[in-house]
Image (tube, coloured by chain):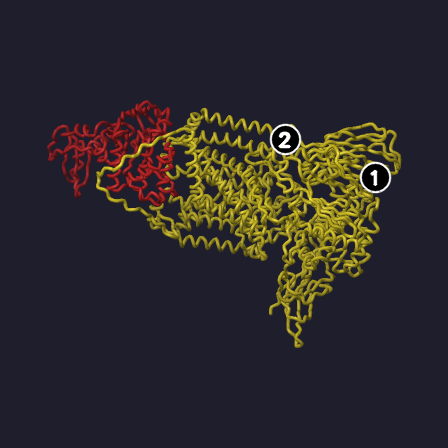
Amino acid sequence: MIGTIYQFEVSYHLKRPVTYLYALVYFILAFSFSASDAVQIGGAGALVKNNAPFVLAQVEMILVVAGQVIITALVGTAVLRDYLVGAHELLFTTPLTRAAYLGGRFLGVLTVMILINFMIPVGAAVGTFMPWVDHDKLLPFRAVAYLQPFFAFLLPSILLISAIFFAVGALTRNLFAIYTQGMFLLVAWGITGRLTRDLDNQHTAALIDPFGLSAFNEITKYWTVAERNSQLVPLAGDLLLNRILWGVLAAALFALTYVLFRFRSEPPRLARRTRDDPAAPILVPGHPTAEAIPATHRTFDGRARFRQVLTLARLSFLNIVREVPFIAIVAIGITNLLNNSWYADALYGQTVYPVTYTIVETVDRTFVIFFVLLITIYAGEAVWRERQLKLDQVADALPVPSWVTMLGKFGGLALMEAFLLLVLIGVGVLVQSMKGFHHYELGLYFSYLFGTTWPGLLQLTALAFLVHCLVNQKFVGHVVMIVLYLFRAVMGNLGIEHVLFKYAQPMGFTYSDMNGYGPFVPGIVLTILYSSGIALILGVAAYLFWVRGTAERFADRARAARARWRGGARAVTGLGGGIALLTGGAIFYNTNIRNVYETSNAVRHLQASYERTYRKLKDWPKPRLVDANVRADLEPEHSAFTASGTFTYVNKTARPIDTVIVTIFHPRIRVDTLQWSRPMTPVLSDSAKGTRILRFSPALAVGDTVRLRYRARWEEHGFRNDGPGTVVVENGTFVNSQYFPALGYQESIELSSEESRKKEKLPAKARMPSINDESARADSYLGNDADWITFQATVSTAPDQIAIAPGYLIKEYQENGRRVFEYKMDRPILDFYSFLSARYAVKRDTWNGVKLEIYYHPGHEYDLDRMMEAMKKSLEYYTANFTPYQYRQVRILEFPRYAGFAQAFPNTIPYSESIGFILRVTNKDDDLDMPFFVTGHEVGHQWWGHQVVGANMQGATLMSESLAEYSALTAMEKRYGRSSAKKFLQNELDRYLTGRANETQREMPLFLVENQPYIHYNKGSLALYALRDLIGEDSINVALSRFARDHAFQPPPFPTSKDFLGYLRKVTADSIKYALTDFFETITLWDNQVEEVSSARRADGKYIVRLKVQSLKFRADSLGNQTEIPIHDLVDIGVFGPKEKGNALGKPLLVVKRWITTKESTIELVVDEQPFKAGIDPYNKLIDRLPQDNVKDIRQ
Amino acid sequence: MTLIIDRLSKTYPNGVRALNQVSLTIGTGMFGLLGPNGAGKSTLMRTIATLQTPDSGSIRFGDLDVLATPDEIRKLLGYLPQEFGLYPNQSAEVTLDHFATLKGASHPGERRDLVASLLRQTNLYEARKKNVGTFSGGMKQRLGIAIALAGSPKLLIVDEPTAGLDPTERHRFLNLLGEIGQDIVVILSTHIVEDVRELCNSMAIINRGEVVLSGDPEVIVERVRGTLWRKTVTKAELEAHERRYQVVSVRLLAGRPVIHIHSETNPGDGFTAIEPDLEDVYFQQIGLSAAKAAA
């Protein structure tokens, strides 16, 4: 019996075209991942190949989850089908058993599901064989890499998905539930993923994820490039448990379905709904009715139509918001939002104040998927509601024009959206309040959500109406909408970049507390109007094809459409077209006429062409800058400035120089003056590539001087396709020195990413010159045409703003209605400067005669005291332990969040409003004072960068970023104690391990770092801290101060990291020197683990603790291939008491260093108090990919 | 006002000829439309109600061309389809108010009165706050007629309105219709021959898309007086009788077949004359048109 049902079910599906459509969709998804760049899923990178086992497993797992949204109806209708065609009553009265019926149906659809999902590995495999696929992105074909994930990871997910859909379909028999449950499942999965990500216990998180991705990520998080490329992800550990658990749960769910399912007509209910029919009074048949129906005036004028639109909108709105699915989607969405906005203040792993823009951006970003869901579903419902209720004949015979009906229904959705936005504002304010933050900017909430989000939603709604009207099949309409959204998501990857193609997407913008919506306003307004114009046309098209009566055939509808194509429809089309043309024209004028329209490809071509044309001139000798007297006349009122100055160069080479290359690589700059103090003839002027070549006559003799007078104008004209410029803005200008000329070929213009270079067919490029390239020592890593220069700057700005450049303020005055500031340096600095201007408030203090100033946006007072303290504490520690501070002032300047960095210029530190000024430090013991740390880091650069600067070669950033990081860490530790350093280093270890896993070229040892952040920041602080732990703080400081003393303000050749390591070597005992090799010269990892630990109480009341530990030590190559090496290291062994507040490890009873010289060792320690935990390297000072198994509880 | 249907034809894409040269003239009062399932009644009514376009033919209502100016007809129209649903989450009062607004009753006070009156007329006033989703079939049907009546229609089309109503409700409903039908054109389609006899001053029988008979029911019935005969036969005799006579209907009475036949003269053979009845006419006409189609 079950066999018959099974066969019937399978062959039923195999006969349906839609089954093949589903299979095709799956195939195409996987195929386009392999065969094109349009679909990017999973962790493939420059080094991790597209068909690496790790990537394939990840992609297959993700596609199963994503695909189920499309396929949801296939399983869901397995039982419902009988009800829909009314066969159930016939079927259930045959001798068929429930087991055979449900079992056969379920196994049947499960088989079909497995077959369809199997298109994922098939599609991915076929895709890799396409002739156009770049073979450098592929490993040799290995069938097992495609099949293993399918059978090991995907089958339980497919079983689970099928069981869920089958259960919902069989038990609710509700079409709506069946069509939308896939989306629900996806959203619910996203939310639980988010919630469990923050669980301390990652095992639990790994088990909870029904599709196994969390467990997968847990296992592979720190996998290196080599592992990702070569190893199959093992079905072991938490992943195995997870797959078994969910497989069993899926089977249990099916069993439950079997128990609950009944051969009855009505779906099972939890509570019986009562049906209330008030007994109508029995009237004598033939009794004449008492009253006449009152006469009513009927009007069909404009006001009446308006009233009709309103009543339809109201009804449509109420119909939506009273529906259980709506409430469910909104409830899920708001839970998700609460969850997300609760973490909206987490920025780069730090906590910020929940200022309104962070919340409103989170609201906008995280709720958009729910809006998309609601619009898709309810536009479909609106179009179909009367037909589903069988009310269409009544409604269509009403004296209401179709446009009124459609407008009313559209209004219902518009109201629903507005209503939800209001709710979201409430949620945002609630979150802010719960976080104890009470500066609610309601104006911002409204302008953001109702000014930019809502129009986009309305435009999408119009599109959804059109799709549903044209397609005229509800579920297909939903699928078409999903396809359109997907298309919208991948448009950029397909090279469709122009804003005019981005329907219903207001131009991207960044709101800043300092500058509001700033320069983005025209772009936002124009793009919204433009899409609205198109939406009007779409609306008319929807109206033309609006189904009225029984005109189901397309020919009938086309005829109706022609009949409706009359005055009103034409007028609205004209209006929409007019708006779209005008605003589209204005947009085009901005993006393509006032500005050059550049696709990302065009910019890439230009850079490549620059390299191809001029790279041969790379080593052309050039005079070096010795003095810069610069001027920036800023015009924040109209986004423009004039850059000018006099630059003095000296021929420091050993030969006369006759030819000079001047580079001003900035596409929108107009150079007005470029005047040399000696005769010269222009050889070439290539303004597109920003390159000019000229010849001095006579040549510039050795030691001779030449001056260049420069003047250039830079203006922002409207906005470009990627938005308006944010360099000079109304409040918060930040102009750096790239608007001034540089001499010689500029390597920094070259394309750096391997992928772009490959696309341009450029040879692979070393990220930095080799450490053995002595010629590279001629330049510091901050500039290639200057060493140490004397510097003077004049900045003028709007009269109500303060403008700042590096240097000491000499003079401030008004001139031609501008406020002018003159700054001068009294000692040489690097050729590294910037100009800022804003309406600042200033906080001042002094430390030992050094003026401390913070220029901030009023309202951002949150962290001023912490910054001020950090400046003092770090100046104090650095001057005491390194060398004296070279300046008489430190200034911190706030700039808008168009960029998110802090950058140290000489005695001047611009700091983005998003990273420094709204950071929130709670008073909890374990919360890191990040404003203190960041300030300490940037002050550290006044030594490491502005006193000592490394040569432009491998290892340069060890001497700037790593040392600044270490200095700040030490200053913070002095201020806040050891636990703060410990917590900080935990994050550093995680980021280092994650960073190397995502390396795109090759991991370098620290002393050869090639400007790789995860190495120079994260590994740098780990290495220096670990070394300090071994040799002592004093020794490190001695090395650092000697290094600074010997190399400060040094002219070329600039110091190298080999020089630096020499200083460390001198202060390190021979027995410890291995640590320099491990941490700096190689990539070394440890795998420490406690195998057993026990304790016994001795007669004297003390406790003896016995640990059996395993210690492995590895060397890794640049791709992460590991080789085990013998261990001979000094490692911490610790014994801990009971857990303390804020200290999960427990009170340290004894922490000692022991030489570990064998893989397995047994250690005995004696402590006075009762021990609870013990372990090896308990503080994770060594780099260990499984840091959590270093400590074990002691069984009592 | 008179509704004039002239040579209306409609063939569905699947080849079914739903209407074939249908011409009818319908004046004020109740007009009954009889016919078996699939005869084309609903197609005819939907076409009059502007929901469907015919392949050919015309419909005029007074001065208005129904097919050319559907919007104008809709202002005069009340339509209750054979099967319909309502918004489940609304109360009866809100539902009716909504439809009254859509029918052009824009003045709020007047509309309130209208809604209240219609609810009373259809005996739903007590239940007006109740959610329509909880209504029984009869209540829903009454609310449907209230919707059809809102806005004082001049042309009321009701398609099998009494199916699913209990006898009390059916009577009440027909009374209401009868009262309204005095001044306007009401087209009532039904399977129940008795309804037409009781209520309608004019009627038509449709089969296979064609009008087989139309006129005043009384006159139609009078026309067959003296031509209908009845006899109780045994099951064994039935077949022979069917061959020999033009049998209009056969029904079992206490297990024995009773046959009605049509004969211009007294057939003898144990037949007795019967008082003519619209149902007999109906069966006779359907039988004739079936025979014609078979021939």
Kindly report the distance in space between the C-alpha atoms of the residues bearing marks 2 and 1. Answer: 40 Å
Residue A518 vertical position relative to residue A1080 in the rendered view, above or below: above
Q: Residue at x 89, y 36 (%)?
A: A702
Q: Give amino acid for label 2.
A: Thr
Residue ID for mark 2: A591
Q: Camera-side residue: A580 or A138?
A: A580
Do marks 2 and 1 share a chain? Answer: yes
Q: Is residue A1098 left or right of residue A556?
A: right
Spot the yellow chain and give its letter: A
How many numbered marks, from 0 up? 2
Q: Badge 1 sits on which subunit? A: A
Spot the red chain and give its letter: B
The spot of residue B108 in percent (x, y) is: 38, 35
Residue ID for mark 1: A626
Q: Residue at x 11, y 35 (%)?
A: B270
Q: Residue at x 80, y 60 (%)?
A: A1070
